[in-house]
Image (spheres, grey):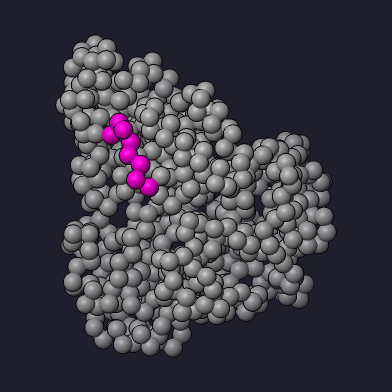
């Protein structure tokens, strides 16, 4: 499954959040208090399937690659790798050089408690942990079928009492102490994105062996922070890793991030301490923000209309130096057809339904006009999204919708069976489904809304039993391929293609472009594929969402991101600025 969008609340107060009294802010250390909206499940990269855990894991652990913090579109850069890999001409072999002189943090799992140097073999071991069926890794899907011999290794040991991690895998080898080689089972250029995800972060075998089942509570990584104690309570306290290597703030930036180059070239990380308090409810955090105790906050839904006026920040906020950052998310939402049902193989019916739908009204009612209108599957921010492109079958255009419905063989909806629309059981999901129901009534189409708990809906989708769904896709990585594959025929349910759309022309387009390395030619094919999906009305696309984040004056270098989980090392706090602006609260 795709990771859900990261929404992080950062707090700069040393007060315990359950206290009724606020203490004076700490102005001697750069301390960042981060509130998490849900409990942290643990600190094993193998289990980094939810964004709450992934965001914490990324403070301690690292991977071969990461993303440039100050560039959009997203750009992969080396992290624990010395440089980007050498890729064979056939696109099947990736060879990495590992940076020398990187050490795991000091921990009792190592001799004399002194962390040892990272080697290529650590990556081999870490990925084999995902393949070990006994571990029940939530990240196995990322490597499943991708690396030569890895699936066979998994099957070999699945039923044996013990697993031999020294048994070699053809496609996963340490050629020497600092050289790591992957041989893929098939051409897959997006493999590099997988190596930047928290699932791919490297762990030390010594720590796994020492702590066993408790390893999830004893993180031992190479990253900028350490977690001395994790008791699965409501507070985590991270401190700067004293053995962290020399790493520096970027010296280049995209235009929108140029103002962050004040810290260019300075050693990372900036923060002395990060405190994470679990706060499930949004209103306590909102109250703290308005007292100057919270640094960075996603605007709660109930406070949005009072905070954003005419898409601008209210004067009461700007007077305190608070700023607003609007960032497009890499996602797409849509009403999906199940092409297993014969009626949806009628393109004129699909056109009629799309033309009857008022996308702008939905954006106003359910997204406070903050959504970016979706024209096809690829969101803004990835190559393949075409600025200015308009989907020719978007509504509302009721007259043309009725014409298409008649051409489909159902004038005024006569003869068309009732269509069921499955959605989640939340109030907002039900209201959106009922809005769609009323839109279709305008041209004589009857919709029956069916609400489901999440497990029930997912089970229906996998069984291909839903007619239509109110659904969406949040990107696993910043590449249009990830948004095209949800309409690729062989990916039909129980795969990612919940629509069960299977068009031979589109399938061929996808198969060609999915094997291409990044290039202008690939971007052109991405654009053509997105136009094809729009023209064939594979779904009724609604919006790409955006995050609306508020930030206090004293916080530097923060921006919202869907994929960069290791962002805390880049954040800085201007203590002098904070002391001055706190007087206004």
| Range of magenta residues | 387-394
Say whether residue 391 is magenta: yes
- Location of residue 581 in the rendering, given as x and y in whole percent from the top left corner: 29, 83
Q: Is residue 253 left or right of residue 440?
A: right
Q: Residue at x 54, y 33 (%)?
A: 510
Q: Is residue 320 above or below residue 529?
A: below
**Residue 541 shown left or right of residue 158 in the figure:** left
Choose between 575 and 536: the one closer to the eye: 536
Residue 400, by quadrant, is top left
Identify the image quadrant of residue 352.
top left
Decide whether the magenta segment is chiefly helix, strand or loop. Answer: loop
Q: 93 or 88: nearer the eye? A: 88
Q: Could you tell me which residue is drawn at 46 percent across and 65 percent down? A: 254
Q: Which residue appears at 32% of the width and 24% of the height?
A: 350
Is residue 60 shown to the viewer in this render?
Answer: yes
Quadrant of the rendered structure where residue 189 is? top right
Say which quadrant the C terminus sits in. Answer: bottom left
Q: How far across and how far down the image is residue 501, in percent?
A: 45, 26
Q: Nearer the viewer, residue 262 or 237?
A: 262
Residue at image location 43% in from the left, 31% down from the top: 532
- Residue 6, percent across and down? 43, 56
Q: Is residue 545 magenta?
A: no
For the question of whether residue 482 can be seen, the reply is no
Q: Position of residue 567 (x, y in %)?
A: 50, 66
């Amino acid at each position: 499954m795709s990771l859900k969008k990261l929404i992080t609340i950062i707090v700069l107060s040393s007060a315990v959040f359950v206290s009724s009294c606020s203490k004076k802010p700490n102005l001697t250390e750069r301390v960042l208090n981060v509130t998490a909206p849900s409990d942290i499940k643990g600190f094993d990269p193998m289990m980094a399937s939810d964004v709450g855990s992934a965001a914490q894991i990324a403070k301690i652990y690292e991977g071969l690659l990461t993303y440039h913090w100050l560039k959009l579109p997203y750009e992969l850069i080396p992290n624990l790798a010395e440089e980007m890999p050498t890729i064979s001409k056939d696109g099947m072999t990736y060879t990495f050089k590992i940076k020398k002189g990187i050490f795991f943090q000091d921990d009792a799992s190592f001799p004399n408690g002194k962390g040892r140097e990272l080697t290529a073999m650590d990556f081999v071991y870490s990925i084999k942990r995902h393949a070990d069926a006994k571990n029940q890794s939530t990240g196995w899907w990322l490597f499943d079928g991708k690396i030569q011999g890895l699936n066979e290794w998994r099957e070999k040991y699945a039923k044996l009492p013990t697993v031999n991690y020294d048994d070699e895998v053809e496609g996963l080898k340490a050629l020497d102490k600092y050289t790591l080689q992957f041989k893929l089972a098939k051409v897959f250029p997006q493999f590099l994105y997988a190596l930047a995800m928290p699932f791919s972060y490297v762990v030390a075998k010594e720590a796994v062996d020492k702590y066993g089942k408790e390893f999830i509570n004893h993180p031992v990584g190479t990253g900028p922070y350490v977690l001395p104690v994790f008791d699965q309570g409501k507070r985590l306290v991270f401190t700067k890793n004293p053995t962290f290597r020399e790493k520096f703030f970027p010296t280049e930036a995209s235009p929108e991030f140029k103002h962050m180059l004040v810290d260019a070239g300075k050693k990372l990380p900036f923060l002395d301490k990060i405190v994470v308090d679990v706060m499930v409810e949004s209103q306590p955090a909102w109250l703290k923000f308005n007292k100057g105790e919270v640094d960075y906050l996603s605007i709660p839904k109930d406070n949005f209309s009072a905070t954003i006026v005419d898409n601008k920040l209210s004067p009461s906020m700007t007077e305190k130096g608070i700023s607003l950052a609007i960032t497009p998310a890499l996602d797409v939402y849509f009403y999906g057809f199940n092409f297993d049902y014969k009626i949806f193989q009628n393109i004129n019916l699909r056109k009629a339904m799309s033309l009857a739908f008022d996308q702008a009204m939905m954006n106003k009612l359910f997204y406070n006009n903050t959504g970016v209108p979706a024209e096809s599957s690829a969101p803004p921010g990835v190559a393949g999204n075409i600025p200015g492109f308009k989907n020719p079958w978007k509504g509302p255009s009721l007259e043309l919708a009725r014409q298409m419905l008649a051409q489909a063989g159902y004038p005024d909806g006569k003869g068309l069976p009732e269509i069921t629309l499955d959605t989640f059981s939340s109030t907002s999901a039900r209201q959106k489904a009922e809005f769609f129901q009323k839109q279709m009534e305008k041209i004589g189409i009857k919709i029956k809304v069916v609400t489901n708990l999440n497990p029930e809906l997912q089970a229906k989708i996998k069984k291909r039993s839903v007619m239509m769904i109110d659904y969406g896709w949040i990107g696993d990585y910043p590449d249009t391929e990830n948004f095209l594959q949800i309409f690729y025929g062989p990916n039909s349910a129980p795969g990612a293609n919940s629509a069960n759309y299977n068009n031979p022309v589109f399938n061929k387009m996808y198969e060609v472009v999915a094997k291409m390395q990044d290039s202008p030619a690939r971007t052109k094919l991405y654009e053509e594929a997105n136009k094809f999906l729009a023209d064939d009305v594979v779904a009724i696309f609604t919006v790409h969402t955006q995050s609306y984040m508020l930030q206090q004056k004293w916080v530097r270098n923060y921006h919202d991101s869907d994929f960069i989980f290791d962002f805390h090392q880049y954040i800085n706090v201007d203590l002098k600025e904070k002391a001055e602006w706190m007087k206004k609260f």
